[in-house]
């Protein structure tokens, strides 16, 4: 271990949970997310206004400004799709096909069915499932384009049966779209891709322009501008969104028997996402934490994205807890996006998980499997949103519509109940609509 | 029909769809909802700030100002619950019990189950259902308190198994809560009720105070201040919400065989909700529309809330369409909260419904049945939100958590796919976390 690596050890913020008071515990679990700055909020609002008012013209100007490329036309055409097919290596294409098949298998199995219940004689109630008519999928290209995100969004949109599915993804410097993203979209059955990124992409999807169709719901992760734009369009009622999005994060609960090299690799694989990412390790074993620290130093030195990972690790926490029960209490309070249970009996502990985006059981299930190809979705709630939001599923692309049908008999069976409640709420016309029919039905 | 009533006929905005150009069609379907005024937005923001910073003290001041009552303590105590039980008429209590049983039957039958799929040999993926830990339910008391809304929110919260369920409802002039709302909450198994209304109730639930617990998700309808407060807390990340809320609305599709008295009663029962409510009738029969107009005049005159209903009807539309197919196209575009199919073969038309909150089939199913006691939920998306939001269900109170477990065999089966994709996305630590394990697993 060299001096630089040894220097990191202190930065890994090793903590003894039992030695912390309530304030220190709260600070230990505070995410490194910055509150959205007032100027980010204003900048996004002005992008939204520009696109709403000036449409494609604004998109061209904003794309020139933020993506530094002049585009006359945003939609990917047949020639560019064909070029993308030729540009993607067969091995990558095959991996996308394989991943897509498992994503489809898992998502299809979880699709909601409608149901029917007779709640009284002659009163049939049911729920019908309907696709969200028009959806927009944002595929970011932070430090690198993310074809896997295209699969994670396009596959459930197609399974849901959405009438119109469009993808937006930032243009590259030469004005083209990432070939792997295009191939992923086409593999998953989505044919309309627009080269638009950032808040302007969200604006185009929310309001529509001459070239970009307006959609009902916008999906996908993105940077703080994309997230703020999604929040603003939902606030203004222009479109719904899948969930708020923040930096990625992982919480690992490991016992003494865990493999320290695996745990260190998992912490680093989260940390490389960016300097805002947070990684937490909770263990009841001080010895395991020692070993993980050593492994972190060794593996970190070998990583290409060492600076990003080092920065993220500076906001990380290696926490020794008194018991695994305590670890689960902390995890449930934190509600991590990714939760890795590096435990000897992970399934026995699973019932304790109250809030998390996605859970990885045991030593042989690195987070990367879920990120890419186990079949689960990787668009997950971050920043504690897992307490009240779920990851993307086919249901995210569907609405449930309730239906009721009463026969004369049904109306007579339950009408009096409705009349009593309507009158108690001083809604006489409600009562009247029932009474009129009851008179006719019993005539 | 007297002169005043005859004067209303013109105000009902009878339209021939085929005679309208695109602009006139869009105007015909424009809801009477006002955009949230800048001062409403500011007023709500300052209420949220006050409660976040000054907690119960702010709640006392705001309650004195907006509800004109001085409250030292907001939570309903045992004595007030007992007084409520004594104050509610047995007939009303019985109606609430009966409604609750059907609401429970319908909602229980629609509860999601987890599921498990093996996506590859040794790769098990599953979805677990978990209750949202802490939820806050807002029961409004616009022109009258709404115990039915207490049932619609409390029953699914209890079925979901939420750990903490609290209700907020505005205090009455004497500082008490509406007895029927208290009895409804208790019948449905919810014991904590706070006498708080408006934006300050939403703020208390989103941030928590010394006396009100912070919750993860806030449910329930309300006026424009409540709705704006819900939007602002979700924008700021303090809590999730069930859905945006706007004025209630109904769209009726009626054929020539429909009963004009029933249709008129249905339009009026929506109109009495408030002057912002919108009612639309679409029919392919001019004769039916004539008859409904006549019935509207007659029934309107007899209503206690005649002024409210008259005002709402002034924003209503009676539209003759060329065909029922055209009516469904218009309805799907409008995405009504309530959709009544006053048709001879309503079930045959049901598959055409793409977007709506709740559908009522045939002549014997007035909307009031769904509002109170058919078993479906009456907390529904308004203002076109039905294109991308669903009504409240048990699922609204639950999260789906995905889980994956790979064995050594499973890791070796799918690990290479993850590595290829990770490398294509330049996420080397992701690849490394898989490679390390693959080496160990095959060692």
Image: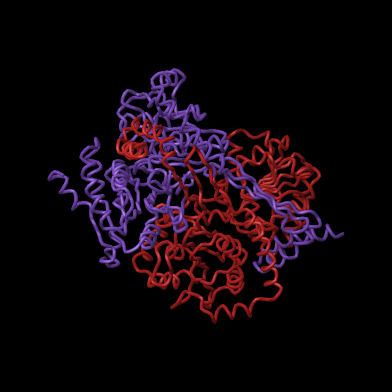
Chain colours: A red, B purple
The residue furthest right is B443
Residue B124's spot in the image, x, y percent? 73, 53
Quarter of the image that includes the N terminus of chain B = top left
The residue furthest front is A443
Q: Is residue A51 above or below residue B208?
A: below
Quarter of the image that includes the C terminus of chain B = bottom right
Q: Quadrant of residue B286?
A: bottom left
The residue furthest left is B3
Q: Is residue A378 above or below residue B266?
A: below
Residue at 56% from the left image edge and 77% from the top image edge: A81
Number of callouts in the render?
Answer: 0
Work out whether residue A288 or residue A189 is closer to the camera in this orientation and state it. A189
Residue B184's spot in the image, x, y percent? 45, 29
Work out whether residue A441 or residue A30 is closer to the camera in this orientation and state it. A441
Quick check: can you spot residue A310? Answer: no
Q: Quadrant of residue B181?
A: top left
Residue at 78% from the left image edge and 45% from the top image edge: A288
Left or right: where does residue A19 sit relative to residue B160? right
Left or right: where does residue A340 sit relative to residue B260? right
Work out whether residue A55 or residue A69 is closer to the camera in this orientation and state it. A55
Left or right: where does residue B188 sit relative to residue A279? left
Residue B158's spot in the image, x, y percent? 54, 34
Residue at 50% from the left image edge and 29% from the top image edge: B190
Work out whether residue A368 or residue B250 is closer to the camera in this orientation and state it. B250
Quick check: can you spot residue A378? Answer: yes
Residue B293's spot in the image, x, y percent? 23, 50
């Amino acid at each position: 271990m060299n001096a630089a690596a040894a220097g990191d050890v202190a930065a890994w913020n090793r903590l003894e949970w039992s030695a912390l008071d309530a304030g220190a515990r709260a600070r230990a679990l505070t995410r490194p997310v910055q509150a959205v700055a007032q100027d980010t909020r204003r900048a996004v609002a002005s992008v939204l206004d520009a696109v709403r008012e000036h449409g494609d013209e604004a998109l061209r100007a904003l794309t020139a400004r933020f993506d530094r490329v002049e585009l006359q036309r945003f939609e990917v055409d047949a020639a560019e799709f064909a070029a993308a097919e030729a540009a993607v290596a067969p091995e990558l294409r095959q991996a996308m096909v394989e991943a897509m098949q498992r994503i489809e298998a898992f998502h299809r199995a979880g699709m909601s069915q409608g149901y029917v219940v007779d709640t009284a004689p002659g009163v049939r109630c049911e729920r019908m499932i309907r696709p969200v008519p028009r959806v927009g999928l944002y595929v970011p290209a932070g430090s690198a384009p993310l074809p896997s995100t295209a699969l994670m969004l396009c596959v459930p949109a197609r399974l849901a049966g959405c009438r119109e599915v469009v993808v937006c993804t930032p243009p590259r410097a030469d004005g083209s779209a990432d070939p792997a993203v295009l191939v992923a979209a086409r593999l998953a059955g989505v044919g309309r891709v627009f080269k638009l990124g950032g808040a302007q992409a969200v604006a185009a999807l929310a309001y529509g322009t001459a070239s970009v169709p307006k959609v009902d719901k916008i999906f996908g992760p993105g940077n703080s501008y994309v997230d703020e734009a999604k929040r603003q369009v939902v606030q203004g009622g222009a479109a719904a969104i899948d969930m708020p999005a923040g930096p990625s994060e992982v919480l690992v609960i490991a016992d003494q028997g865990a493999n320290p090299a695996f745990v260190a690799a998992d912490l680093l694989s989260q940390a490389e996402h960016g300097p805002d990412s947070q990684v937490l390790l909770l263990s009841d074993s001080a010895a395991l934490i020692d070993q993980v620290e050593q492994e972190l130093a060794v593996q970190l030195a070998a990583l290409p994205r060492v600076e990003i990972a080092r920065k993220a690790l500076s906001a990380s926490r290696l926490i020794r807890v008194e018991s695994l029960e305590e670890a689960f209490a902390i995890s449930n309070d934190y509600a991590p996006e990714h939760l890795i249970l590096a435990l000897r009996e992970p399934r026995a502990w699973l019932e304790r998980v109250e809030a998390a985006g996605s859970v990885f059981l045991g030593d042989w299930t690195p987070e990367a499997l879920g990120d890419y190809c186990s079949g689960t979705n990787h668009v997950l709630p971050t920043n504690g949103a897992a307490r009240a939001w779920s990851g993307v599923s086919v249901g995210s692309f569907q609405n449930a519509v309730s239906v009721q049908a009463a026969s004369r008999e049904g109306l007579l069976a339950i009408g009096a109940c409705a009349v009593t409640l309507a009158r108690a709420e001083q809604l006489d016309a409600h009562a009247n609509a029932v009474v009129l029919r009851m008179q006719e039905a019993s005539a």
